[in-house]
Every structure is written in structure tokens, then in C-alpha cells.
Image (cartoon, grey):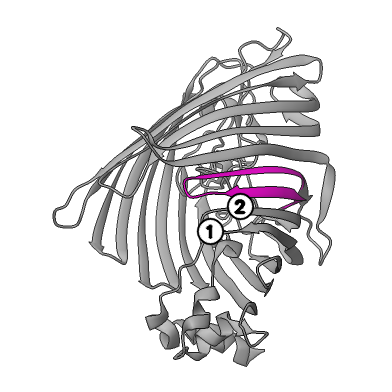
Amino acid sequence: MKKLIYLFLFLPFFCYGQKPNFKSLRYDEDNAHFAQDSTATWYQRFKFIPLNTKKSSYLSFGGEFRSQYFNYVNPLWGDEPKDADGFVLSRYLLHSDLHLGKSLRAFVQLQSSLSNGEAEAPSAVNENPLDLHQAFLDFNFLSGKNHSLIFRIGRQELLYGSQRLVSVRDAPNNRQSFDGAKILFGAKRFKADAFFSHYVQAKNGIFDDVPTSNIALWGTYATLNQAPVINALDVYYLGIKKRSAVFDDGKGEELRHSIGLRSYKAGSNWQYDIEGLYQFGTFSNSKISAWTISANVSHAFDVNLHPKLGLKTELISGDLDYADGKLNTFNPLFPRGGYFGLAALIGPSNLFDVHPSVEFSAARNLVWTTDYDVFYRLSKNDGIYAVNGRLLYSGKGTNAVHIGGQLGTSLEYTPMPFLYVRAEVNWFSAGAYLKQAGNGKDILMSGITFTLKF
């Protein structure tokens, strides 16, 4: 076992010249091009193991090791137990990818998430010793130069758009997955998915993660690239049903539909990402009417240190009245962990925030970023929520709207494609609302992350 660990630790130093193209969704990585390389290194042979003479069938392996140390001063603004020396999170991912010609594929991934030193018993998001994270089959019915039609069934990660609503949840220790079926159509400038799934509930045991019938997610997501004027456009519908949902307005069964539109541009000095969506449906005996509008604009300058200035802002609806028979609280469904900065202290419900940032690149592999995010409750008749949708504080008994401000800075170092290191510090200055709703102490979070992919 030790030899295997040493192998993966020193893997980058032996394979630096290969420059793999790692993806957020590891199943999106294409290793078939190694079939044409007659001078393949041992690492390339590890990524492409031919199973027939034509090399049309092959097996590939890959994985990730991530270790993080975090220290919080006044966690949950002083309302959670103190932790003097911090805690360590570790995550291990290992996958195999089997291709049998162009028509059939099987992808399997194991995940192990461990926690050491937390003040309280860790949740399943931080501590999930070993489980089957993904296991699906792909049936390819149309394989052309510019067209594809794939039917996928089994346990799988889902990621769409900017990950505001559906993400792999990479920032927390345990990534999330879904059991379901999906149809994927791809063309030269257009792609579209349709899927139905049940959320896989993480548990603290070994091989005990199961899909929960209490949470179902379905939808369609379409993307048009190289569109006139707007560059790229996403149009989507997402539906969710939860047997038991909790908001500041109450508790009950939730059936919610989300219709959204996103326009974005990347790959140039000017970049933007603008998105708006509306939600409707039913919650207990109430009707749902919620919405959000967000904008993320940045500009990079071609001068020394390559400074990049950015500005993000969002309006996210909250409940307007506790007793009007309507729920206006926005539900972010399954968003990415670090929704507002690296600390991930607040989730995207009932908020108005303004988030400027500046980034400097001392070299291609060394980036320093500083940002400041100021938060307000958009509605006085609703509380604030965690990233996972859990109610943190009620809006009852206070009219204060200023939640606080979060100042963060990070240094990211990528010496080679296999290795990533990030050091970060975040300070959250509690505003009037937090001081009235709880202890309202300022939070100081520091951490370091080490990630090795292969």
C-alpha cells in the first residue's frame, strides 16, 4: 500500500511533460488519442490500456488525492463550539473507464472522504469513509464527426452551466452524485441533455450511500455556442420534489420548477456571465414564486502581473410575508460549495450582494486573488440560509438587513498540471442582522489545500 501511495505522490515528477487535460467531470476526459502515440510513456499506458488489436476497446484509470487544513475563529459567528487547533479533511477518488468500441462504455468511481479534528462529530459531507460514488453505462446510438446521441443510466455526477443550481459540489469534502437516466445529444454548436434522477444521500458508513426517494431532480439543459451577438446561450428547465423541505416560512412538501436563461463569454480580456431564472410550484399549502438575477463581469489587462478586475452582483428573492400563502424564498437546488467566496458561509437565498475582486498573475502558475463581498437580506420577512439550503437564522424578530462583509485573499500555485496548492484567509465582519439574530462575532478562517490528480 505504501508503494502505491509513493507512486501517486511522485507521479507528477515523472510525467510532467505529458500535460493531461483534467476535467471537472472526470468522465469527460478523452484518452483515446493515446492510441496513436507509438512512444507512449508508462503514464500514458496507464491512461490507455488497449483491449484489442485495433485499439477500439480500451481501459483507462485515474484519480485524485486532496488534503485540506482549516482553522475557524468563531465558527457560525460564535454560535458553534470553538476549535482551537483546526481540522484536516482528506479526499480520495479513484476511477476506471472502460470503452468497448464506440457503442458501449462503463465508468466506475470510488470516493473516500475523511475528517480529523473537528470540534463536533463530522457530517457525512466531511466524513464518508468509502463508497461507490459513480457507476454508469453509456450506450452510444449516434457517433459521427459532428453528432452524438448517448443514453446514460446509473449513478453519476451532474454539472450544468455556472453550477449555480446543479454542481458536483467540489469545495466540500464529499462530492455529490445522483442515480438516474440521461439522454445527451451533441452537435457542432449545440448540445442538450434531458434527465431524471434521485439524489444520493451520503452516509457515514462504508458502501451505504443510497438514492433517496425523498428528493427527485429532473430537467433539460440546452447550450448554443458561437451565437450571434451573445456568444453563448444556455436555456434550461429544472424540476425538484422534496417530501420534507424547511424554510423560515415553515415545513412541508415542495414541488418546484425553475426556468432559466444564461448568456456568457469567456476566453478573451472581457468576460461576462449573466443569468436570470424564475421558480414556481407548490410548498405545503402555499404557492411558490421566486427568482434571481446575477451578473459577473471581468476584464484582464495585458500589462505586468496581468491584473484582472471583476465585479459580481446578485439579487436573490426571499419570502415577502410569513402569512400570505406564498413562498418567495429562492431554492438554489444543488449549488457549488464556494458560492460566495472560498469560505462558503452563506447560501444563495434572500440576498443582495456586491462582490468586487482583483487578481494578479506573477506567472502562469502563480495567481493571487483578493475579493470583498458585502451581503444584505433582500427581504426582512425571511432568514438567511447555508449553501445546502439549511436555515441558519430566522428573520423573525429583527428588521436589520445588513448581514456583513467578507474579505478574502488566496494564493494559488500550479507547478505542473498534476499538482495544485492554495492558501487562503477569509475574514467575515458581522453586520447588524447577525448581531441581533445570534452572537454576531466576526469569523476568521484560514486554510491550505493540496490536490494531486492523475
**Residue highlighted by disc 1:** 24
Do callouts 1 and 2 mark residues in contact (Cβ within 8 Å)? yes
Which residue appears farthest toward the top when viewing the image? Answer: 324
Q: Is residue 13 above or below residue 33?
A: below
Instruction: Say whether residue 15 is left or right of residue 334.
Output: left
> Residue 249: image x %, image y %?
71, 19
Q: Within the image, what quadrant is residue 361 found in?
A: bottom left
Instruction: Say whether residue 105 is left or right of residue 274.
Output: right
Q: What secondary structure is marked by label 1?
A: loop
Residue 288: give its label.
Answer: none
Secondary structure mostly seen in magenta is strand
| Residue at the image point whose x is 65% and y is 73% from the top | 94
Q: Within the image, what quadrant is residue 258 found in?
A: top right
Q: As rendered, which of 64 and 399 lies closer to the eye?
A: 64
Q: As rendered, which of 313 and 55 lies closer to the eye?
A: 55
**Residue highlighted by disc 2:** 168
Instruction: Say whether residue 183 is left or right of residue 243.
Output: left
